[in-house]
Image: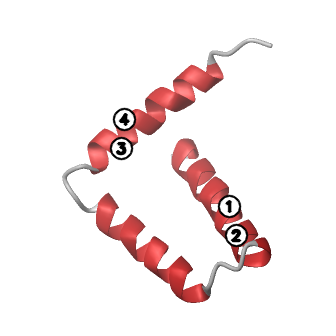
Amino acid sequence: MILSISGIVLFGTIAFLFFRRDGLKISHAVVCALLGFYVAGSSIAPSITAGGASLAGLLGGIKF
């Protein structure tokens, strides 16, 4: 759950920055959001979730 909320915050921030600085139109943001909902309901969603969890584990294991 925490990873999902972090992903939402991350992608929301990126979309906001694109909107403010690079001219992302509201229609583009709506299309991106709809694409996310459709991908979440597809058969590839578990693979994407597993890949995100794997990447988070990899990044969490980096020692500075």
Marked residue nearer the N-terminal end (3 or 2): 2
**Residue at x 36% of width, y 35% of height:** 50
Secondary structure type for disc 1: helix
> Residue 20, image x and y in percent?
78, 76
| Amino acid marked by disc 3 | Ile
Q: Secondary structure at mark 4?
A: helix
Q: Quadrant of residue 63?
A: top right
Q: Residue at x 71, y 62 (%)?
A: 13
Q: CA distance from mark 3 to mark 1?
A: 19 Å
Badge 3 crowding class, 10 Å Cα cut-off, few under 14, some 14 to 19, many 20 or more, is few
**Residue carrying label 2:** 18
- Which image quarter: residue 35? bottom left
**Marks 2 and 1, Cα distance to the nearest angstrom?**
6 Å
Callout in the foreground (2, 1) = 2
Left or right: where 22 falls relative to 47: right
Determine whether, in the image, residue 3 is placed left or right of residue 15.
left
Question: Marks 2 and 4: CB-CB under 8 Å?
Answer: no
Q: In the image, 1: left or right of 59?
A: left
In the rendered image, the quadrant that contains the C terminus is top right
* Residue type (three-letter) at the residue carrying disc 4: Ala
Q: Which residue is labeled 3 in the image?
A: 48
Determine whether label 2 and label 1 are within 8 Å by CB.
yes
**Residue position for label 4:** 50
Measure how far apart labels 2 and 4 are at the Cα level: 27 Å
Q: Nearer the viewer, residue 9 or 26?
A: 26
What element does badge 2 sit on? helix
Residue 4 percent location from the top left of the image: 52, 50
- What's the distance in space between the residues labelled 1 and 4, CA to CA? 22 Å
Q: Which mark is residue 14?
A: 1
First reached walking from the N terminus: tag 2 or tag 4: 2
